[in-house]
Image (spheres, rainbow, N blue to C red):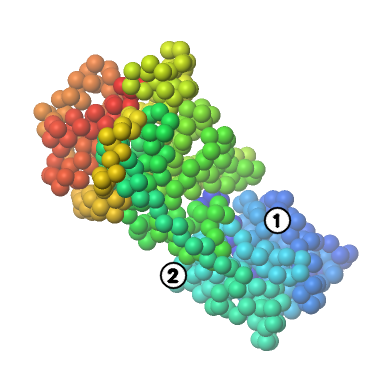
């Protein structure tokens, strides 16, 4: 029977699906057909597999070859199926024993010389294989460290197709083949750069407080101020205030970066919250994800469990900013294309930085500003009301004064503030244990407005007046309550009082007053 089978994994978004790779060698004129909804890159595997097999010194069957990827209704793409197709064909040609590859997932791209190159998405693919009950995978050597992050899976690495065939046949591996379990000699670990320290920020007491509150509760933040006031400097120091990711979140973040191709070769688990700062010329597809066929993750997903910083936010396309509404509310992105839909996690902290006007000199009395009132209004109105309504903290960053530049002053460093943030997050973890929420920013509004977590009416009086006058939406009401709970956690209190709610309300309104 000239039929060979092995396993591969098709990724649709962050979700992986096990694929049966079947190869048939039949009599007839030489031909090579791949069925099962392959994309262009996968369709070109015919030439890569043929050349890699011949150049590896392995006999390639010059007959009618048919490869089927089942289920055929599932879209499949990329070059990660090359290795599985080659192995299935060699089984069908009776070069490799079927028993050795029956329940093994093969991932990797083949070079024309037979070498096996690293591919994207190995971690989510191995996770999908483990959930499907497969406990053996073969990956490129430079993906071995990434695949080994999944517990309970036996990972075998290979550098060449010839070496893999020799292993399956019980023969000594070629000299070029790297033995399983060794590190790829070509991989050089990149040095980890130290995070910038908050002590470098001069003055800006209110903005520093807002940054600490945002870090403690996972709140979104708008920094509004003139050029040179320190908005970008403050935003770049936010990741240093955040604690390390827990194992579950770290695995999820690493899987997204693996799929996006931003995980360095040989890198281990991503344990620090990512910081993503796209340029203001980025397209909607670059921010939320997109591309031909099944869409790829964008900057919003790469910032999952970290910080998405949009500097010069009014300069971004309006479609880009409005596309962020869904992940800000739901913590994930569902992107639909003609060939299917893809789901990507996108629970990030959004930090926006903006000048008060096109020339940037409208802060304070604005006597040096050369912009017309209409130009100022039009500039800031590029940040739509529905988007700003989802931003918990909206703070004015004023110009630094000469008094704040005292060389003898010693501002608090990142380590000190991060300690308070860590304590506040531990308090939130105890409060919301068993609910599925981790931070105050994730708690639904009705939970804070009703039941045991409801604040005393005297504490929320200022918010009630805002809703009555129409200056505060119900969403804004809920977000002020979330910030108030974070202020309580930072000071070690039990429940928000009038001062906490008033401070949270001021932190939300200060930037709007400046606008």
| Mark number, residue 455 | none
Q: Position of residue 375 (x, y in %)?
A: 47, 15
Local packing at callout 1 (Cα closer than 10 Å; few below 14, some 14-19, many 20+) is some
For the residues labelled 1 and 2, say whether their Cβ atoms are less than 8 Å apart. Answer: no
| Rendered position, 209 above or below 161 | above
Q: Nearer the viewer, residue 283 or 452?
A: 283
Q: Nearer the viewer, residue 507 or 453?
A: 507
Q: Nearer the viewer, residue 18 or 332?
A: 332
Residue 208 place in picture, x, y as percent: 29, 40
Give the alpha-carbon distance from disc 1 to disc 2, as whole Å: 29 Å
Quadrant assignment, res 51: bottom right
User: What residue is at 16 percent from the left and 29 percent from the top?
Assistant: 460
**First in sequence: mark 1 vs mark 2:** 1
Q: Does residue 476 appear in this view?
A: no
* Image quarter hosting the N terminus: bottom right
Asked if residue 204 lies left or right of residue 270, the reply is left
Residue for point 60% across, 80% down: 179
Residue lying at the far right in this picture: please name it. Answer: 29
Quadrant location of the C terminus?
top left
Is 113 drawn above or below residue 173 in the view shown? above
Residue 339 rendering spot, x and y as whole percentages: 63, 43
Q: Nearer the viewer, residue 166 or 115?
A: 115
Quarter of the image for residue 183 reads: bottom right
Left or right? Give the position of 61 relative to 423.
right
Question: Dot 2, how many residues are within 10 Å of its Cα: few (below 14), some (14-19), or many (20+)?
Answer: few
Q: Tell me residue 254's x, y (percent).
A: 47, 57
In the picture of the structure, the residue carrying the numbered disc 2 is 151
User: Which residue in the structure is indicated by mark 1?
Assistant: 42
């Amino acid at each position: 029977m000239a039929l060979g089978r092995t396993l591969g994994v098709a990724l649709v978004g962050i979700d992986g699906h096990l694929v049966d790779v079947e190869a048939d060698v039949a009599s007839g004129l030489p031909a090579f057909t791949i069925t099962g909804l392959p994309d262009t890159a996968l369709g070109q595997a015919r030439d890569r597999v043929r050349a890699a097999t011949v150049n590896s010194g392995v006999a390639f069957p010059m007959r009618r070859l048919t490869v089927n990827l089942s289920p055929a209704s599932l879209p499949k793409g990329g070059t990660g199926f090359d290795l599985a197709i080659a192995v299935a064909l060699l089984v069908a040609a009776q070069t490799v024993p079927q028993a050795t590859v029956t329940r093994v997932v093969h991932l990797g791209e083949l070079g024309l010389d037979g070498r096996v190159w690293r591919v994207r998405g190995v971690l989510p693919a191995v996770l999908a294989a483990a959930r499907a009950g497969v406990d053996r995978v073969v990956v490129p050597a430079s993906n071995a460290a990434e695949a080994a992050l999944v517990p309970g899976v036996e990972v075998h690495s290979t550098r060449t197709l010839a070496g893999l065939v020799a292993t399956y046949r019980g023969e000594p591996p070629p000299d070029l083949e790297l033995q399983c379990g060794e590190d790829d000699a070509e991989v050089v670990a990149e040095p980890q750069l130290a995070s910038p320290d908050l002590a470098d920020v001069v003055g800006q007491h209110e903005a520093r407080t807002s940054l600490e509150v945002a870090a403690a509760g996972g709140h979104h933040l708008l920094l509004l101020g003139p050029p040179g006031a320190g908005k970008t400097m403050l935003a770049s120091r936010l990741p240093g205030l955040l604690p390390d990711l827990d194992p579950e979140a770290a695995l999820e973040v690493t899987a997204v970066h693996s799929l996006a191709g931003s995980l360095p070769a040989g890198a281990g688990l991503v344990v620090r919250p990512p910081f993503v700062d796209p340029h203001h010329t980025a397209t909607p597809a670059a921010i939320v994800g997109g591309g031909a066929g099944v869409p790829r993750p964008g900057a919003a997903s790469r910032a999952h469990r970290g910080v998405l910083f949009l500097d010069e936010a009014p300069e971004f396309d309006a479609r880009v900013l409005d596309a962020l509404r869904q992940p800000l509310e739901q913590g994930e992105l569902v992107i639909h294309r003609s060939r299917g839909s893809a789901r990507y996690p996108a629970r990030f902290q959004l930090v926006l930085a903006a000048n008060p006007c096109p020339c940037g000199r409208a802060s304070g009395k604005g006597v040096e500003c050369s912009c017309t009132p209409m130009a100022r209004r039009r500039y800031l109105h590029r940040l739509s009301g529905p988007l700003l309504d989802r931003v918990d903290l909206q703070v004015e960053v004023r110009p630094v004064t000469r008094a704040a530049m005292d060389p003898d002053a010693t501002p608090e460093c990142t380590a000190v503030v991060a300690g308070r943030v860590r304590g506040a997050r531990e308090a939130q973890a105890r409060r919301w244990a068993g609910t599925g929420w981790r931070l105050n920013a994730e708690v639904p509004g009705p939970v804070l407005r009703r039941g045991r977590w409801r604040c005393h009416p005297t504490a929320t009086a200022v918010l009630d007046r805002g809703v009555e006058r129409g200056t505060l939406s119900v969403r804004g009401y809920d977000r002020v309550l979330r910030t108030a709970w974070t202020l309580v956690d930072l000071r070690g209190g039990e429940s928000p009082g009038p001062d906490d709610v008033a401070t949270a309300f001021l932190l939300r309104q200060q930037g709007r007053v400046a606008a």
